[in-house]
């Protein structure tokens, strides 16, 4: 393992542990008696039940919907498969809190666990669909053909041959969905569904840096660690790299026939209508109601410019920081790589407000000149969205066989040249996909930006939240629409880069 690479990975991990250290220190200062009194009470049991139920119900639904959608558009002759393939990635362009705002304005009575599962599924199933669709395109069809030649039926081939090869994409997607559910705030506030994150925000609003909120954040850390252990077990230690030209031949699409084509088309159309159609129509409706008065162009252009700067810079920095960890997790597997990779997920599982308060505490006490600067905001984004880049980079490096790099070195190419000319080229689509996914997260981020942004900063999400909190739904509509429009190109980049076949 290259020493500079290991040192860089350790430095990123040390920074990632900053919010966790903040929670631990605050918990120790609280004392056991106070901590136990705050934790072992009916309210915490209610929040734990809501949060666990949300994850347990939503994640399997996202897996089924995402894998089924990827299979229908990637491996069957469904009508308009290329169009459906792009549209199914579009829900990522709609922030979860905008989705919730749209559904609540359409159905004011929507709420509770059902509302949380509905909105979460519609917002996050692409996190499973996109990597699954990309992996399906990379699979060698010869393996499936061999299974069929040995007498295996279609269902047996799917569950015994295809699904095991999708394990990395499915496990990574499920983990991302789970972490989003733990950290999401705005979407659940609109539907009045209490989770640990909404409770933490309420506690910090009432008592800044309160001990009750810190205790709840500690429970979220434990939930995150549990998810990491589960994902590690499910992922396993199988290798997914392939040497040869097998990936150059695509699998022959399955004929659905007149019996199955209509239900599949209804499923795909309904999914797009609920996840994209409802929020877009709702936003356009409020724009019509508000008229031209809601377009305050000075505020709009300032918010767009600030959002673009934060998004682009944050995406580049996050991908650079994620690369050493992704490299070690694929090329040097073991307890050390699992530790490096696992710790990066802890900050992303915490609400943005907890990460922000950790940075506020550190900058005020130790590096006061950095307090409320753009550098601190970008650092917070990197910690919050590092797993988004890491999951994609890890999948891309897993598709870049180390044997090709070794072959290049055996022909006289230096290690660094072999890395840039072979490995980095093969991992470029995954890197672009990871950057696009981080950009989407930054555009939609709210709570950390509210606390850390320099005075006068007003991003699109901040403007939307400020107006929607005042029940000015018409005034918030322009910012919701621009967030969707701004995210659409990145969603397309994410999808198009993810589906590229490595090495082609």
Image (cartoon, helix red, strand yellow):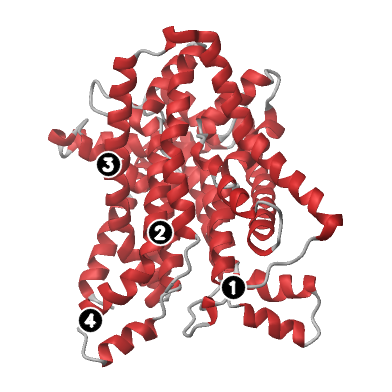
**Mark closer to the chain start, 2 or 3:** 3
Residue 114 coordinates in the image, percent (x, y): 71, 33
Left or right: 240 as drawn, with respect to 336: right
Q: CA distance from mark 2 to mark 1?
A: 27 Å
Residue under numbered circle 2: 390
Q: Residue at x 82, y 56 (%)?
A: 260
- Mark on residue 378? 3
Q: Circle 1 — which element?
A: loop
Residue 14 coordinates in the image, percent (x, y): 29, 56
Q: Circle 3 — which element?
A: helix
- Mark on residue 363? none
Q: Is residue 122 above or below residue 255?
A: above
**Mark closer to the chain start, 3 or 4:** 3
Q: Is residue 281 visible?
A: yes
- Mark on residue 415? 4
Front residue of this view, candidates 487 and 365: 487
Q: Residue at x 42, y 26 (%)?
A: 204
Residue under numbered circle 1: 250
Q: Circle 2 — which element?
A: helix
Front residue of this view, candidates 240 and 302: 302
């Amino acid at each position: 393992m290259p020493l500079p690479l290991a040192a860089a990975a350790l430095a990123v991990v040390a920074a990632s542990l900053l919010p966790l250290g903040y929670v631990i220190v605050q918990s120790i200062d609280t004392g056991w008696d106070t901590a136990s009194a705050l934790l072992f009470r009916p309210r915490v049991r209610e929040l734990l039940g809501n949060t666990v139920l949300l994850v347990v119900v939503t994640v399997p639904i996202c897996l089924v919907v995402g894998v089924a959608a990827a299979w229908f558009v990637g491996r069957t002759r469904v009508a308009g498969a290329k169009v459906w393939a792009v549209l199914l990635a579009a829900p990522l362009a709609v922030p979860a809190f905008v989705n919730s705002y749209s559904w609540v304005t359409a159905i004011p009575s929507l709420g509770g666990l059902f509302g949380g599962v509905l909105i979460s599924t519609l917002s996050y199933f692409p996190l499973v669909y996109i990597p699954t669709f990309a992996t399906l395109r990379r699979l060698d069809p010869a393996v499936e053909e061999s299974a069929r030649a040995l007498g295996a039926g279609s269902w047996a081939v799917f569950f015994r041959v295809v699904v095991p090869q999708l394990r990395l994409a499915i496990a990574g997607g499920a983990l991302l969905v789970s972490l989003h559910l733990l950290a999401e705030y705005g979407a659940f506030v609109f539907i009045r569904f209490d989770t640990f994150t909404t409770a933490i925000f309420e506690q910090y609003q009432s008592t800044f840096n309160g001990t009750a909120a810190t205790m709840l954040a500690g429970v979220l850390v434990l939930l995150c660690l549990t998810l990491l252990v589960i994902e590690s077990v499910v992922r396993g230690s199988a290798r997914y790299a392939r040497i040869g030209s097998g990936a150059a031949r695509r699998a022959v699409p399955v004929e659905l026939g007149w019996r199955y084509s209509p239900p599949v088309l209804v499923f795909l159309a309904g999914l797009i209508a609920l996840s994209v159609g409802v929020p877009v129509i709702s936003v356009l409706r409020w724009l019509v109601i508000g008229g031209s008065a809601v377009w305050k162009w000075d505020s709009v252009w300032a918010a767009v410019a600030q959002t673009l700067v934060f998004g682009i810079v944050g995406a580049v920095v996050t991908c650079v920081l994620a690369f050493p960890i992704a490299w070690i997790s694929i090329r040097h597997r073991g307890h050390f790589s699992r530790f490096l990779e696992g710790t990066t997920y802890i900050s992303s599982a915490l609400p943005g407000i907890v990460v922000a308060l950790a940075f506020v505490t550190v900058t005020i006490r130790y590096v006061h000149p950095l307090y409320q600067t753009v550098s601190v905001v970008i650092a917070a984004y990197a910690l919050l969205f590092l797993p988004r880049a890491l999951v994609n980079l890890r999948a891309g490096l897993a598709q870049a066989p180390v044997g090709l790099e070794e072959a290049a070195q055996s022909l006289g190419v230096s290690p660094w040249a072999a890395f840039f000319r072979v490995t980095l080229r093969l991992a470029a689509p995954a890197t672009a996909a990871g950057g696009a996914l981080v950009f989407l997260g930054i555009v939609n981020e709210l709570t950390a930006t509210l606390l850390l942004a320099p005075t006068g900063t007003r991003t699109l999400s901040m403007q939307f939240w400020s107006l929607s909190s005042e029940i000015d739904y018409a005034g918030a509509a322009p910012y919701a629409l621009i967030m969707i429009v701004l995210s659409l190109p990145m969603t397309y980049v994410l999808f198009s880069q993810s589906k590229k076949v490595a090495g082609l």
